[in-house]
Image (spheres, grey):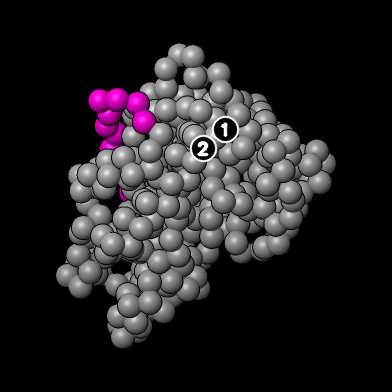
């Protein structure tokens, strides 16, 4: 495993796009190429990118310097304004990015984690929705600093496994790795939720939309796929992936949706809920692979 994939003294950069032509194909391709000058470990989202620069391509040991260079390069080469957060984890880097938005740069060092999290509103924790926020408020917990003082066993007793996740995040402990979604032989669509989903009906509605979008891409490019991959991000930030190979190639949304629902049943969403659902289609035949470059530019 490369140094960038370990959970030791990591350097995670979260970039939020404040102004820029996000839907311009050429600009998005240039943005992706710029970031890859620093690392290949890039996770893309709607209006943001997360980079693991622990072992970056320039061999720069100082995360703050890397973050400043990336922000400067984006401004000079693309003319975009971005907010940047640097921290030892994805969760902290996201909060840091939001701290001085727009056009800010916030660095959270390991020794600053406690002070940084102290006044963060409790609903900034993954998995804390309206109901959980009310339950925590009844415990006199309205900020992450207060939550960090609650004994772990008390949170587990009240909230089960979610309570353990809350406690560890409140201590600044988050070992989730940056997970690049791009694959040269796959197209994918993701959707995230402001609050976790807990009902199968809502999850199926989301999967139905993802399947329709993906198969629309396939039909537009006259492609068919055999492999269906489901990605689930639980409220505690853990992720799960399930893949199946179909007996025949397809570009039909109903067929993909049905398989995605079967894969969903193989995950823990029934107990834990989900904050993100993603679908990927692959397994194209050799003659079709050339066309996938078109998707790379459309979805950086």
Which mark identifies residue 295?
1
Residue at 74% x, 51% y is 20
Front residue of 300/137: it is: 300
Specify the quadrant that holds the C terminus.
Answer: top right
Q: Please say if 239 is above or below 133.
A: above
> Secondary structure of the magenta portion, mostly?
strand
Which mark identifies residue 15?
none
The answer to whether marks 2 and 1 mark residues whose Cβ atoms lie closer than 8 Å is: yes
Within the magenta stretch, is there residue 84?
Answer: no
Where residue 122 sits: x, y (%)? 42, 72
Corner quadrant of residue 105: bottom right
- Tell which residue pokes out farthest to the top in this image: 286
Residue at 43% x, 61% y is 193
Label 1 sits on a secondary structure element that is helix
Q: Is residue 24 visible?
A: yes
Residue at 31% x, 40% y is 255
Specify the quadrant that holds the N terminus.
Answer: top left
Mark 2 to mark 1 CA distance (whole Å): 9 Å
Q: Is residue 107 visible?
A: no
Corner quadrant of residue 40: top right
Q: Earlier in the sequence, mark 2 or mark 1?
A: 2
Front residue of 6/9: it is: 6
Q: Which residues are magenta?
A: 238-250
Which mark identifies residue 217?
2
- Tell which residue pokes out farthest to the left in this image: 157
Where residue 39 sits: x, y (%)? 58, 30
């Amino acid at each position: 495993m490369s140094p960038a994939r370990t959970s030791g003294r990591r350097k995670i950069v979260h970039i939020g796009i404040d102004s820029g032509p996000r839907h311009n194909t050429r600009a998005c391709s240039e943005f992706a190429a710029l970031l890859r000058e620093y690392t290949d470990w890039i996770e893309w989202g709607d209006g943001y990118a997360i980079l693991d620069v622990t072992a970056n391509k320039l061999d720069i040991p100082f995360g703050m310097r890397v973050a400043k260079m990336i922000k400067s390069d984006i401004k000079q080469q693309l003319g975009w304004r971005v907010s940047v957060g640097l921290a030892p984890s994805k969760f902290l880097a996201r909060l840091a990015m939001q701290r001085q938005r727009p056009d800010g740069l916030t660095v959270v060092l390991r020794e600053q984690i406690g002070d940084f999290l102290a006044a963060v509103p409790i609903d900034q924790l993954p998995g804390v929705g309206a109901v959980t926020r009310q339950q925590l408020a009844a415990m006199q917990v309205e900020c992450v600093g207060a939550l960090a003082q609650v004994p772990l066993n008390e949170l587990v007793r009240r909230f089960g496994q979610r309570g353990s996740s809350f406690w560890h995040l409140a201590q600044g402990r988050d070992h989730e790795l940056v997970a690049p979604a791009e694959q040269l032989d796959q197209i994918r669509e993701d959707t995230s939720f402001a609050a976790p989903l807990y009902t199968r009906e809502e999850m199926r509605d989301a999967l139905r939309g993802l399947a329709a979008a993906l198969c629309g891409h396939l039909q537009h490019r006259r492609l068919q796929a055999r492999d269906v991959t489901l990605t689930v991000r639980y409220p505690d930030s853990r992720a799960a992936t399930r893949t199946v190979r179909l007996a025949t190639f397809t570009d039909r949304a109903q067929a993909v949706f049905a398989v995605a629902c079967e894969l969903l049943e193989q995950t823990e969403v029934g107990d834990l809920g989900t904050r993100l659902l993603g679908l990927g289609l692959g397994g194209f035949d050799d003659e079709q692979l050339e066309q996938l470059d078109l998707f790379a530019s459309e979805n950086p």
